Image (tube, rainbow, N blue to C red):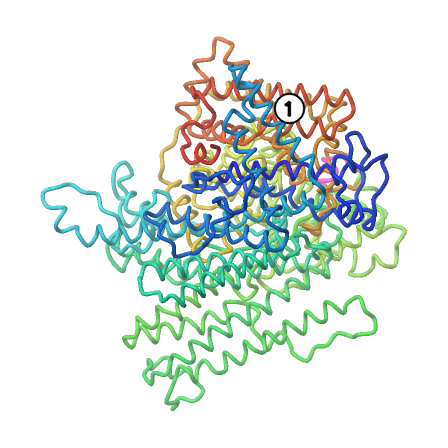
Amino acid sequence: MIRSCRKTSFGAKMKASHTIRKVRNGSRLDGKSFHRATTNGTTSQQLFPKGGRSAHYHSFAWRATNIFTDLVSSKKNNLDAVNSIHYRSSTSSPSAYSSMNDPHPTLFGTNRMNIDAQLRADVRTMGSMLGKIIAEHSGNEMLDKIERLRTLSKAWRKVGDARKNSSSNNKARVTADKEFASISSFVSSLSNQELLIISRAFTHFCAIANAAENHHRSRKNEEMLRESVRLVNTTAETAKGKSIEMPSPVCALGTQPDSCGSIIPALLKEPYNLTPEEVHETLLNQKVEIVLTAHPTEVNRRTLLDKHHRIQLLLTEADNQRRHGDCTPYQKKLLDESLEREISLIWQSDELARSKPTVQTEAEMGTLVIENVMWKALPQYLRKLNATMISELGGTQFSLPLDATPFQISSWMGGDRDGNPNVTPTVTREVCYTNRYRAAKLLTKDLEDIYSRLSTTYCSADFRSAISDRDAREPYRAFLEPIIAKLKLTSAWAKQELHNAQSSCDDKHAPTAAIRADDVYTSKAQLMDELLMVHRSLCDTGNELTANGRVADLIRNLWSFGLSLIPLDVRQESDRHTEALDAITRYLGQGSYQQWDESTRMSWLQKELSSSRPLVRPGEWHDHPDIFNSTTVDTLETMQMIAEQHEESLGAYVISQATHPSDVLAVLLLQRDAGVKSPLRVVPLFETLDDLEGAADTMDTLFSLPVYRGSIEGKQEVMIGYSDSAKDAGRLAACWSQYEKQEELAIVASKYSIELTFFHGKGGSVGRGGNPATFNAILSHAPDTINGRFRVTEQGEMISQNFGHFDRCERTLDIYTAAVCAEQHTVRTKPTEEWREMMNRLSETSCRAYRDIVRGDERFVPYFRAATPEMELADLNIGSRPAKRKASGGVESLRAIPWIFAWTQTRSMLPTWLGVGEAISEVLQSDDADKLRIMYRDWDSFRTTIDLVEMVLSKSEPSITEHYENMLVSDSESKALGVEVRRKHEVTEQAVLELTGHKELSESNELLKRLLK
C-alpha cells in the first residue's frame, strides 16, 4: 500500500519540480506574480509549459523539499503489513471509507487482532486524522482529489507500472501506458495551489506511516522478548526427553539472528565451538566507533522530527494501555486527541528551513542525539550486554568490565572543512567548547542524582581516608560535593572559553580568564579515578547492587563520551596542505614545494620531521600576505587551533583526496610545526578508483620510513571512501576495488606489524555504499580486514533513523556489537584466483561502460542537468556546505549526495546500476556464464553486491524517468541519450534476472515484494 501511496504523490512532486524549473519564456516569476497565478486558478500546464528555461524563485522553492521524499522513504524500507492495507475508492464523496477518511479514527479500535494488524490500524488511524485535518483546512473537494490521484496510481501499478518496458505482454504495456497517461492528465489539470496541497498530503502521510512502522519494529522486538520469556518459563515442561534449542534465559537482548542475544550462545556451539573465555575476550577487545557527520541528507526540519518522535511515544503509550487493558474512556480520548494535535501541527508547519544551517547548528543537532538518546541508551544497552554475557558464558567472571568501551562516538560536525569554507578554526573552537560545556552539564546532572541517592553512612576505610571530613556521617555525599562543584566550575570554564572563541574576531572584547584550566576537569582520567573509588567502596561494603546501577552507568558514559562529549575529527583536502607548505618553502627561500616531484617532497619532509627547528612562527604569516594567502592562513591557523585544544577534544586528522605518501607526512609536519604536543593520528582517505589503486603502495612507503613508524606507535587508520569511488567508477568497479584494496592494505600492515583500522565512509543509500542489512554488510567485508575494529560514518537522516529514538538506538548498538563479534569467528568464502580474474573482467567492463556515459558522452551533462533537479538541490537549505567542492567545477566536482539525490528523484537510480548490465551480459554470453553463476551462488560478498543492485532496480521506475525527460528535456540529443540510458536500464534488469535465476526482481525478498506491490 505504502508503495502505491508514494507513487501517487510522484505526479505532484514531478509537477512541483517542473514548476520550479520551467517558466514561460524563461522569465523569472516573483512571489506576487506566483500568488496571483495560483489564487486565480491558473493551471501548472498553462503557467509552466514544456520547453521553458530554468528559473528559481523564493515563493515556490520550498516545494522542492518533496524532491527528497521518495529518497527518504525508499531508505526506510517500509515493512510488514503497511502495504497490505485495503482501500475503497473515494473519487466522489469524502464519506467513502479510505486510509485517509475513517470516520472515527482512534488508537483503540477493534481492528487489532494480531501484531501486524496493529501496524495497519495505526497507519489508518493517523491517515484518517490527516485527512480530516486536510478537509478542515482545504475542503472535502481537495481531499477527493487526493484520493482520486491515489486511486489512479494504484490502478497503474496494478497493470504493470514501470516494468512495462521489459514485459512481453504488449496488451499490458498499452494498458499501463493508458493508466499512466490518466495520471499525467489529471495532474496537469490541477492548479499550482492544489499541487502544493496534494504533494504535502502524501509527503506527510508517508512520513507518519514511516513513524508508525519505526514504532512497529520496536513493538515486534518487544513481542519477541516476551515470547522468549514465555518459552523460558515453560522450559522444564517442554524440554523433557527432547532436544530443544532455547533462547537466552536472561532475555535481556533480542533473539533475532543479528542480536548478541543469539550470537553469544551460537558462538559456543557448532560450527564455532568457542570457549566462554574466547567469546569473552572477543567482546572485551572489539571496538565500534560511530562517526556522526553533517552530510546534508536529512531534509526534515528538527521541529518535524520532534513531532514524529512524539507520535511514536504516543503509539508506545497506547500499546501499553491496550496491553494492560485498564484504560479509561477519558485516557483513550486524551491519547487520541494528543495524536491528532501532533498531526495537525505537522500539517500547519513549514517543511523547509528558510536559511542554511550554520556549522554550529549542525553540530548541535549531533550533540542533541547524544544528550537526548544515547546518553541513556548506551549504558542501558551495556547493562543488557553484561547480563547476557554473564548468563550465556557462565558466571560473573565473564561480566563486562566498567572500563570496557565497545563503543565510541565521534563527529565531523564542526571539524569537516573539506570544501566547506564555513568551517573555520574559530568555528571548530566554538564547537569543541560547546561540547565540553554540554558534557559537564550532563555529568553534573547525573552526579547530583547519585548524590541524592547515596545517603548511606557506610563506606570502606580506604574511601573514608580520601574524604576531607573523615567524620562525615554521609561519606559519599561528602566525597561527591567537591566533585560536583568542580564539574559546575568546568561548565562555567567551557562557557567562558566559548565566549572567548566567539569574541576572537572582535577587537572590542578582550578574552577573559577568570577560571583557569588547571582548576577544572579537562581529562576524563581525572574524574574517572574519583568515580571508581565510589564504585569500589560500594562493592567492598556489600552494595554491589547500588554500585552497578547509576554509578556504573555514569562510569560507562564517561569512558565512552569523556569530558568532550563527542571528539571531533578534522578533515581537509590534501591540496590545502600542499599549498601551505608551498608558501612556507617560498617564504624560507627554498623553492616551490608545489612544483617539486614526489621524491623531492619526501626527502624534504623527512629531513624537517627529524629536525627540531620551527619552519614559521605563529602569526608570522600575517606579515607577508604576498606569500600567505587567505586559504594558506586558514590551514596554518587550523593547526594552531589543534595545538590549543585540550586532551580528547579532537580525534583524527582525515586527509581527503590523498594520493601520495607526502600527503600524510605533510600533515604530520604541519602539526609538529604548530606545536601540537600529541599530534592527531593522520588518516588518509582514499576515495577515487585511482586513489584506491595506489593505496597499498602509499602505505607501504610510509611504513618503511623510520620517521613515520616512530610517530604512529604501531597503529594506523585508513579511510575508504565509498560514495566518491562509486561516483567515479560505478558501483560494481568501486565495490571490487574497495574489497581488493582493503585486502592489500591489511597485508601491508601485517608485514610491518601495524595494527590497521579501516574507517568506512559510507552513506545511507546503496549508491553511497550503504546497506540496510548492517549485520550482513559487515560480514560481507573482506576476511581479515576488520579484526574487531570497525569505524564507520553515520550520515544525515541515518543518524535520526538509527539513533534518534531510544529503542532503535539500543537495537542499532546491538546489531553492530553482534556483527563485529561474529565477523571475527565466521569462516567466509574467499575468492579463488578464477573468481578474482572474473571480478577484474567485470570491473573493467562496468567501469568503461559507466565512464563512457558519465565522462565520455558530451550529451550527458546537459541531459543530467535538464532531466534531474540537480540545480534545485543546490538551492535547498539542508546543509552548511556547498553542493560542489569547487564552485567552478562541473559534474566531476559535484558531491556524491546531490548526485545520488538527483537520480533518485527521477526514479532512475542510475549511479547504482549503470555499467553493471554490460559487465554481466558480456560474461553470460560467453563460455564463462556458468562460472559467473557459481560465483554468485557461492561467494557471499559478490552475491550481496548483486542483490543490492537488484533491490535498487526493483525500486526504480522507468516510466517516471521517461516522464521527467518528456517534461523537462527539450534538446533532441539529450532526449536520445535518455532513450539509450533507459535501454541500458532494461538490459541491466534482464542481466541481473538471468544471473540470479529470478523470474522477477527481488523475488526472494518477501518484505520488499510486499512493499512494491
Using the rendered view, name the quadrant where residue 820 is placed: top left
Q: Is residue 601 found inside the magenta-colored segment of the image?
A: yes
Using the rendered view, name the quadrant where residue 564 is placed: bottom right
Residue stretch in magenta: 596-603
Q: From the viewer's side, name the closer residue of 335 and 74.
A: 335
Q: From the viewer's side, name the closer residue of 717 and 148.
A: 148
Query: Callout 1, which amino acid?
Result: Tyr
**Residue depicted at x 37% and y 89%:** 473
**Where residue 327 sits in the image (x, y, percent)?**
35, 65
**Where residue 791 sits in the image (x, y, percent)?**
51, 47
Residue where numbered disc 1 is placed: 850
Q: From the viewer's side, name the closer residue of 191 and 480.
A: 191
Whether residue 654 appears in this view of the structure is yes
Q: Main secondary structure of the magenta part?
A: helix
Which residue is outermost to the left? 241
Q: Is residue 271 found inside the magenta-colored segment of the image?
A: no
Q: Is residue 661 above or below residue 624?
A: above
Which residue is outermost to the bottom? 471
> Number of numbered discs present?
1
Side of 940 where 838 appears, left or right: right
Counting other residues with Cα less than 10 Å from the Cα at mark 1, is it few (<14), some (14-19), or many (20 or more)? many
Using the rendered view, name the quadrant where residue 988 is placed: top right
Side of 885 where 744 appears, left or right: left
**Where residue 50 sits in the image (x, y, percent)?**
77, 30
Q: Is residue 446 above or below residue 854?
A: below
Whether residue 610 appears in this view of the structure is no
Side of 470 where 593 appears, left or right: right
Which residue is outermost to the top? 927
**Residue depicted at x 46% and y 19%:** 995
**Where residue 329 sits in the image (x, y, percent)?**
38, 65
Q: Secondary structure at mark 1?
A: helix
